[in-house]
Image (tube, helix red, strand yellow):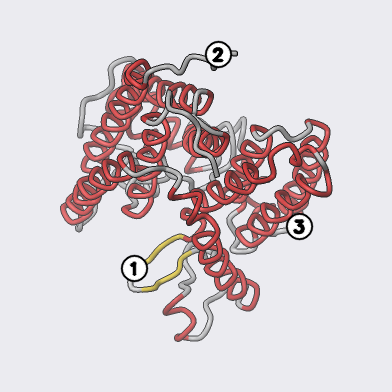
Amino acid sequence: MTSPAVRHPGEFRWETRLLALVTLILTAVGIAECYSSATYLTSWFHEASQQALAAAAGCLIFLLASRLDYHLWRRLAWPLFVVTLAGLGVIGAVALAFRHHTGPAIVNRFVPYLAGAHRLLRVGITVQVSEIARFTLTAWLAAKAADLGPKVRDFRQGFLPLMGILGAVVILVGVEPSVSMAVVLTIIGATVIFTSGARVSHLALVVGIGVVAVAAVLLLDPVRAHRQATFQGSALQCTDGQACESLIGFGNGGITGVGFGKGTQKFGALPEAYSDFLFSVIAEELGLVGVVFVVLCYVVFCWMGFRIARTARDPFGTYLASGLTVAVAITAFMHGAVSTWLMPTTGLTLPFMSVGRVSLLLYLFSAGVIVSIGRQRGRPARQR
């Protein structure tokens, strides 16, 4: 019996190159728009130059990650995940102990209270640990699912352990509180578990529980309840300032936009224009043409990501590429939905584009890992 033919890696090369190209384009456009949207700040040059330096470092990280054997992340998945879980545990403990206010100076030094939440950890550099969890959680779930193999379809032996860890991470992120990031991590984790072959009935049960949990948070948490009520009550009267100003930016842009750097909504009307509402700035300055171009770049990125996942050389590569691709897709979608008033404000940035140096580095690193998975296709699967 002859073994099946193995496709040559060169046959897949265009997919990894196209993914790398759209990643570079999104990053470059993001630097330009961050420069434009931050011009009203007194520190605009510092912000723009820091973002450009982060992009340069991120490109080097992208190249390194694309050249490394992605199986390295299977070996490091557990220790990286444990460190991430410890960071989330520290932040969650502080958030529960000092709900809706700052803690003692020593606590606030390491876990600052900003924008109504404890989400950051200062350890030499300031990082949002839930951002790191997008990769470490995905890598751990992918490695564990690959180890379980067909057992993933068994509720007790496979599905429940995976969902238990995912649930623990989501709860820790939710108590910060960061409901939007908790939703993102849930979708990423569910994607990895579904891709690994879990039963749809098991996932449907978890989805039902998740919907009830999110509804409970929106109703019982006073901040989220007020935000949701404001969003629903302002739908016809446009009384939600952030959402209305974002829509005005879209209206001002028209088909071709008012011109790069000539947008006016960024001058105080849109809070966090260079991060939470960057899509509105793009719409105003580059118009419908710019919006369609950016959306198409994300579509191509996700298309290539899923093609790479489908043809990966082993299950771990498939699960990891699927999770990392969905991380970009769902975050970009939710950012766009907030900017176009389809959902309440979440605070999620636009992947590869919004200001956020650590976030940019992590997205470029994740894209490099996807390219690494793509480059190794067509070779025999590794035996453990």
Q: Is residue 32 visible?
A: yes
- The mark nearer the N terminus, 3 or 2, is 2
Q: Residues within 10 Å of mark 2 (few under 14, many from 20)?
A: few
Residue at point 28%, 22% (across, down): 257
Q: The disc labelled 1 sits on which kind of residue?
A: Ile
Residue at point 55%, 40% (across, down): 239
Query: In terms of image quadrants, where is residue 178?
Result: bottom right
Q: Label 3 belongs to which residue?
A: 220
Q: How far across and how far down the image is residue 206, in percent?
A: 78, 42
Query: Which one is in front in this view, the residue at disc 2 or the one at disc 1?
Result: 2
Q: Is residue 331 visible?
A: no
Q: Quadrant of the C terminus?
A: top right
Q: Quadrant of the N terminus?
A: top right
Q: The disc labelled 3 sits on which kind of residue?
A: Leu
Query: Which one is in front in this view, the residue at disc 3 or the one at disc 2?
Result: 2
Towards the viewer: 262 or 164: 164
Q: Label 2 belongs to which residue?
A: 2
Q: Residues within 10 Å of mark 3 (few under 14, many from 20)?
A: few
Q: The disc labelled 2 sits on which kind of residue?
A: Thr
Tell me the number on the disc at residue 334: none
Towards the viewer: 346 or 266: 346
Element carrying mark 1:
strand
Q: Label 1 belongs to which residue?
A: 125
- Relative vertical location of residue 310 with respect to residue 128 in this rendering, above or below: above
